[in-house]
Image (cartoon, rainbow, N blue to C red):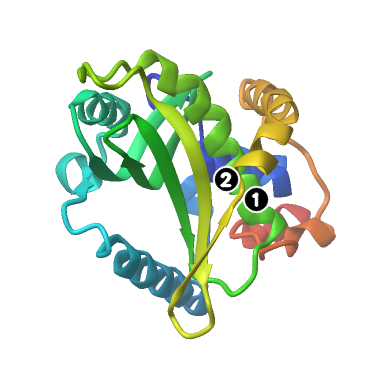
Amino acid sequence: MTKGYILTKSKYIRGLQCEKAMYLDVYKPKLAYYPPEILAKFRQGRVFEKTFKETFPTGIDISAQLRYRMEDYPILTADLLKKPGEVAIFEAGFLFNEVLVLADVVHKHTDGTVDIYEVKNSNTVSDTFRNDVGIQYYVIQHALPSIQPGDLFCNGLTLKHFYLLYNDGNDGFVKEDLLAHAQAECQSIEHRVNHFKQVLTEDEPELDMSEHCDTPYECPYKRYCKRLKK
């Protein structure tokens, strides 16, 4: 685990499927196995995301500057959001309650309102995508008030929209605002976050293999768990 945070967005989502897989993601990530077809889907998703980001020609890609220095993402994000005027940030980092999330696109308008986009190369909106937006909202809505823009015409930052941006089936973009859904889930998300953090302080969970190993996605630690059963 890296100083400053225990959970990330991806590890939280992993924990919703299987707490043991989340634990392995934190402590034994080299045990994960992703078949070639899954890696191909990851690449396709990155291409789709890149295409959308190109609609913000002046966007600033934090990951290009910081690479794997994850603890610095929230610092640089805050610095950029404090600057007067409009700004679009790619891979913007936010930290709250020892949870780090990176948002695909954060678009701050000149009046201090903020739109966030989570980009998925999919034709449908799944519960996993809603959970993805939910954990991001939980962290970001707590982090934003501590970021005070240096613009006399801006009274502070206000999260106005949290869009899920997905594929219309022809590599075009469809967006759905999930802000209200995320707001409604905030209390239950905090409960799960605190539970997951407790799980990560204990020994590796002992869980039997079952339907959850393939729902909603095939777990990358199935090979490891199968070996344990022998």
- In front: 146, or 228? 146
Question: Considering only vertical position in the picture, is 176 above or below 138?
Answer: below
Q: How many marks?
A: 2
Residue drawn 66% across the image and 40% down it:
180
Residue drawn 36% across the image and 43% down it:
106
Q: Position of residue 27 (x, y in %)?
A: 51, 36
Secondary structure beneath label 2: helix
- Give the CA separation, mark 2 to mark 1: 5 Å
Residue assigned mark 1: 130
Secondary structure beneath label 1: helix
Question: Considering only vertical position in the picture, is 213 above or below 142?
Answer: below
Amino acid under disc 2: Val
Q: In this rendering, does residue 25 appear at all?
A: no
**Which image quadrant is residue 143 in?**
top left
Q: Is residue 164 left or right of residue 75?
A: right
Q: Residue furthest bottom?
A: 170
- In front: 210, or 183? 183
The reply to whether the C-beta atoms of the residues labelled 2 and 1 are less than 8 Å apart is yes
Label 1: few (<14), some or many (≥20) within 10 Å? some
Residue assigned mark 2: 133
